[in-house]
Image (cartoon, rainbow, N blue to C red):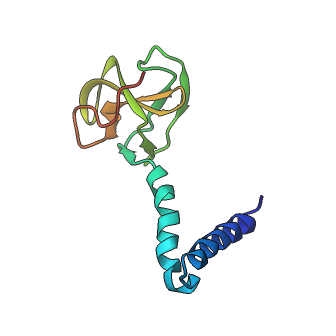
Amino acid sequence: MSVEEVESGVGNAVGDVLEGAGEAPSETLAGAAVAVAGPVEALAAKRYTVHPDYRVNVRSGPGTNYQLVKVLPYGASVPINCQKPGEWVTGPYGTTNLWDNIANGQFVSDAYVYTGSSGYVAERCA
C-alpha cells in the first residue's frame, strides 16, 4: 500500500465518520487530524545525547567484556529503551554501573550519555 493510499484512506475514513455524525468534514477536519496524529507522536522515543568529545563503543551486553557491536559517531544521540546494571565505568558524566540499551542487543555505558540523572531514567531491562 502506498503513502497516497494510506493518506486517502485515512481522509476518507475521517470524512465518513464526520458525515455520519451530521457534521461537514471541513468543519472538524483539523480536530480529526490531531486525533490521528496524536498516537504517532507518542511512539517517538526520547533521545539522549552522547558526550560530544567521545566516539562511544556499543557492546552486546552491559560490560566491556561483551562483544563490540559498533562505535557511535561524535555528537550521536540515542534512545534508552531500558537500563541494566553491569560493569562499573568512569566517563565524562561520572562513575556508574548502569548500561543503557539503545537497540536490541546494543548497550552503552550511562557514564557517556547525558540523562540529567545519576540513576535510572528508563525501566530496568528484563
Is 10 above or below relative to 124? below
The residue nearer to you, when weighing 67 against 107, is 107
- Is the N terminus in the top left, top right, bottom left or bottom right quadrant? bottom right
Q: Position of residue 51 (x, y in %)?
A: 35, 43
Name the residue rendered at 24%, 43% in the picture. Answer: 116
Q: Position of residue 32 (x, y in %)?
A: 51, 72
Is 54 above or below relative to 37? above
- Is the C terminus in the top left, top right, bottom left or bottom right quadrant? top left
> Is 109 left or right of 14, judged from the image as shown?
left
Name the residue rendered at 49%, 39% in the picture. Answer: 72
The residue nearer to you, when weighing 81 against 29, is 29
Is 115 above or below relative to 23? above
Can residue 52 be seen at all in this image of the molecule?
no
The residue nearer to you, when weighing 88 against 45, is 45
Is 58 above or below relative to 13? above
Can residue 70 be seen at all in this image of the molecule?
yes
Name the residue rendered at 44%, 42% in the picture. Answer: 79
Q: Position of residue 56 (x, y in %)?
A: 44, 34
Q: How many marks are shown on the rendered structure?
A: 0
Q: Name, please, the residue furthest toward the right.
A: 1
Q: Position of residue 16 (x, y in %)?
A: 64, 73
Name the residue rendered at 45%, 28% in the picture. Answer: 107
Q: Name, please, the residue furthest toward the top.
A: 65
